[in-house]
Amino acid sequence: MDWQPQPDGLQQILEILRNGQSTDNKVQAENRERLAVLAQHQDFPNYLLHVTIFSPNEDIIIRKMAALVLKSSLSQIMPKLPPSNVDHIKKALVQGLSDSDKGIRDVCGTVISNLLYLGGLKVWPELISGLVQFLDVQNYDTVEGSLRTLDKICEDHGKELEQEINGTVPAHLVFPKFLTLMDNSNETLSLLALSCISNLLISNCPSFNNYFIQKHDHTNPEVRKLVCKSLIALMELRPDTLMSELNNLIQYMIHCTKSDDDFVALEACEFWMAVADLEDVSQHIPPYLPVIIPTLLERMVYSEEEIFALGGDEDDAEVPDEAKDIKPHHHHSKVHSHQHIPNAEEDSSKSKSGGNKDGMDDDDDDDYDDDDDDDDDDDDRNEWNIRKCAAASLDLFSHKFEAAILPPLFPLLQSTLQSQDWKVCESGILALGAIAEGCYEGIESHLPELIPLLLQNLQNRQRLIRSISCWTLSRYVPFMVKVATPEHLDLYMTPVLQSLLTAILDNSKKVQETACSAFSVLAETARGLLEPYLDPIINTLSTALGKYQRKNMAILYDAIGTLVDAVGSAVNHPRYLELFMPRLMNTFSAQHDEDRDALPLCECLGYICTGLQDGILPYAPALLEKSFRVVSDILMTEQLFLAGQIQDSPDKEFLVAYLDLLSSLAQALGPQSESLLANYANNIPQIVLASMADTYADVRQSAYAVLGDFAVPAGTILEPHMNDILTKLISEIAPENPFPNVCNNAIWSLGELSLVWKNKVSQFVAPIMERLIKMLMIPSTIRTIAENCAITLGRLGVGCPEIIAPHLEHFSEPWFRILRYVTDNAEKASAFQGMLNMIQMNPTGLTKSFVFFCDAVVNYQNPGPFLDNYFKQILEGYKTMVGPNWDGYFSTFPETIKNPLITRYGL
C-alpha cells in the first residue's frame, strides 16, 4: 500500500460514516455538508478506499457505507486527480475484488466498470489481463469478484473489448476462460461465465455451440435460460457457427419452449422470432414447421396464473380507474406530408427511409405489446411474456413462410376454435389474428366461415374471448372492405360494424378498449364507406362518452377523431355535432391545464377540426382562447425556469398538444380564422418566436406547423418579424439535422410563408434555395422532406422566379421526379406555378430534363384551367425552340408520355 492516511483525517471520515446511521435529520444535514467539503480534497477517495478495503477490522456496515459514498462520487472526482492518486485507486479497487464480503466485491467491480466510461481500456490496458489472471487463483472470493466484474465490463463495454489494445484483443483473451468456467462445478461461477458470453459474443467463437448444446439438460433453469439467450445472440451474430448443429439446436429450442419454467420458455421462444428474421437460417426451417407451429400454439394459451392476475369476468364498466391503471399518453407532434398517386412506381432513390411510406414515423409498433388483447388489465400488462412472444413468433412465421404454415396450423385452428375449454378457444382466435397479414391469401377463402364464428364469440360470456375476437376481426378489416359492393359489405362489414358498436358499450372495460381500437381500424380503412352508418356510429360513441372511465376515454377520443378524419364533412351536420361536441367541449373547458387527459382530447379535437373544416367555427373561439392561454402560460413558466426563479421546467407535451390544436384550427378555417386570430395579434408573434427557439425538438416541430398554418390568416401579424423567422427556419434546413420532422416542418412552413410574403423574402431566397437544392440532390433524403423541398422551391418561384430560374438545370430533374408522384392538391399546384414561371424565364434550363417535365405533366391528373393552359404554353414554346428536330426528338419519348401529350396538348 503506497499511500497512508493521516490519523486525524481518517478519524474524521469514520465519524461522518458512523453518524450516517443516525435518524436525526439535523445530523444527516451536517454530514452532507461535511462530506461536500471533504470531497474537494484530492485524497478524499483514498480515505474512502482505506476504510472500504484496507480496514478489515472495521464494522462491515461502516465499510459498506464508505463503499457507497465512493461509488456515488468517484466518477465526478476522478478526472481532477493527479496520476499518482489515480494509480493508487486502480490498484486498490482491483485488490478489493478479493474481499471476503461479497457486497464490497460488488461495489469495487461496479466502480471499475464505471471508471472505464471516463477513458476506456486504453487508459487502463492492464485491467483485463489482471482480471484474467485472477480467474486462475485458488481463492473463491477472488475468482467470483473478478468474474462478476468482467460480466459488468462485458455488458457495459462489450464493443470496446473487441478492439485491439497494445497488440491484443481483450475479448480473445477472456473468451477461452469463460468457456472453461462454464464447466465449473460451482454453479455461481458457471452462471457468471454464461452471462459473460451472453453479453460478449465475439465473432471468434471456437467450440461455442458444443459447450451450449452440452448444457441443454442442466437442472438449473437459470442455466438453461442463459444457454438459450446465448444461442440466440450467437445465431443472430454468426449463424454459420451453428448450422452443423441446426437439427439439435431446433430440437433443444422446442424442448425449452415447452418448459414448465416460463422464463426458460420465454427465452427459447425468442429464438423463433430471431430465426424468422435470418434468411440464411429460415430457409432450413420449413421441414420443422409441423413441430414448431403446434408448440407455438400451445404457448399461446393463458396460464392459470395469468388468468388469476387478469381477474374475473365481473362487469367493471362503472368501477373508476385507479391512477396506476392509466398508461401515460404521449402526444405526437404534427408532420406535414403528402398523399401519393395510387400504384405509382415510385422513384426508389427517394424512398430509402425504412418501412413506412414517408420515413417520418419513428414509432415501432408491436401488435402483441400494444394492440393485443392481454396488455391492459393489470400491473403486469406491459410485460413481455411467453404468450405474446409465441403470438409474435407465429406472426413473423406467417410473413416469412406464408401459406406453408397453414397445413400444420389450420387443422389445429379448427379444433381450438371449437374447443369447450375457453382458454384453448381464445388462443385459437389469437392465432387467427396473428396470421392475418402473412397468410392472408391462404386464409381468405376460409373467412366466410371464420368471420361469423368470430362474431358469435363477441357474445361469449368470457370477456377475454370477446376482447380477442374484437382484435382478430380488426386484423381482417381489409377483407371486409375489399369489394365495395352492397352485397359484400352487407355480408361482412355491416355485421362486423354492428357487433363492434355493441361491444363498444360492453360492461367490461377490457372489451370496450379492444372494441374501440378495432372500430378505429375499421374507420381508418373503410373511410367514406361508413357514411351510411353514421347515425348508429355517432349515437354509440356519444353514449360511450357518458359511460367510459378515464383510461378508456383516451381510446374513445382516438376513435372519434379517426371517424371524423375518415368521413370528413359528412359529420358536419347539426344532428351529429349536437350529440358529441357539447360533451367534448365541456370536458375541454373543465380540464385543468396540466391534466394529462387533455392530451388525447386535444388530438381528438385536432382531427375534428380537420374533418369539419368550417364546421368547427362555432367552437373555435373557446378552443382558441384556452389554447392561446395555456401556450402563453407554459412559455412564461419556461422563462421563469430558465431565469432560475422556479425549480421545475413545465411539461412540454402540453405545449406541443395545444400548439398542434392551434395549427389544426387555422388549417381547418383557412382565411376565415383571420378575424379570430386578430384578437391575439399580440400573442401570436411572442408564441411563435418563443416556440421556434425552444430547445425541445417536438416544440419546434409544432411551432413550424403553427407558423405555416398561420401564414395566410396571420401573415400580416407576423411580417414585422420576418427576418427573425426566416433566419431561424433557414438554420433548420440541413441534411445533418438530427430531427428530420423539425427540418421537414420548417421547409413546409417556408413554402407557406413564401406564398404570402412573395417577393418580400427575396433577400433570403439565395440561402434557402442553396439548402433546398442540396437536400433535393441527396438520394437518401427522406421522401417527405424531399417533397417539401421541391414544393417550397416551386413556391419561391411564384414571388421570386428570377432568382431561382438561372439554377433550373441543377435541380429540375429530381424536382419533377419527386412531385410526379404527389397527389394533385393546392400545394402541388402552387409549386408547379412557380416552376413554370422559372421555366418561362429560363427555358434552356429545362433542356436536360424536358422528358421528366413531360412525365410530370401527363401524370398531373387535374391541373385546372390555369395550369393546363400554362403547361400547353410551355410545351408549345419548347417545341418551337427545338424547331425542325422536334419530330425526331419527340419520337424517342416513351409511349406512356408521348400519347397523352398528343391527346391533351396536340403536340
Image (cartoon, rainbow, N blue to C red):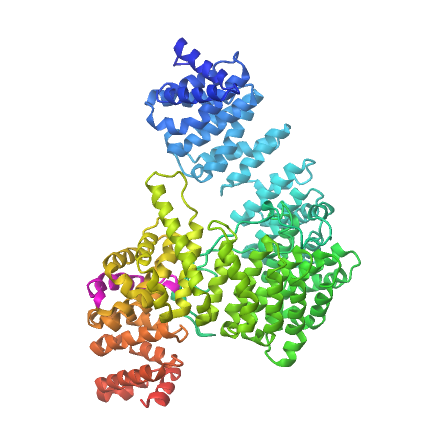
> Which residue is drawn at the image coordinates 56% and 65% (left, top)?
580
Q: In the image, is residue 454 above or below residue 66?
A: below
Is residue 241 part of the magenta span, yes or no? no
Q: Quadrant of the N terminus?
A: top left
Position in image of residue 28 (x %, y %):
47, 21
Residue 228 place in picture, x, y as percent:
61, 43
Q: Residue at x 31, y 65 (%)?
A: 714
Q: Is residue 80 above or below residue 677?
A: above
Res. 748 in view? no
On the image, the x and y values in percent for residue 805 come to 22, 72
The reply to whether the magenta stretch includes residue 764 is yes
Image quarter of residue 417: bottom right
Q: Quadrant of the C terminus?
A: bottom left
Residue found at x 41% / y 40%: 648
Closest to the observer: 142 or 16?
A: 16
Region rendered in magenta: 760-785
| Relative side of 132 to 545, left or right | left
Residue 54 at least partly seen: yes
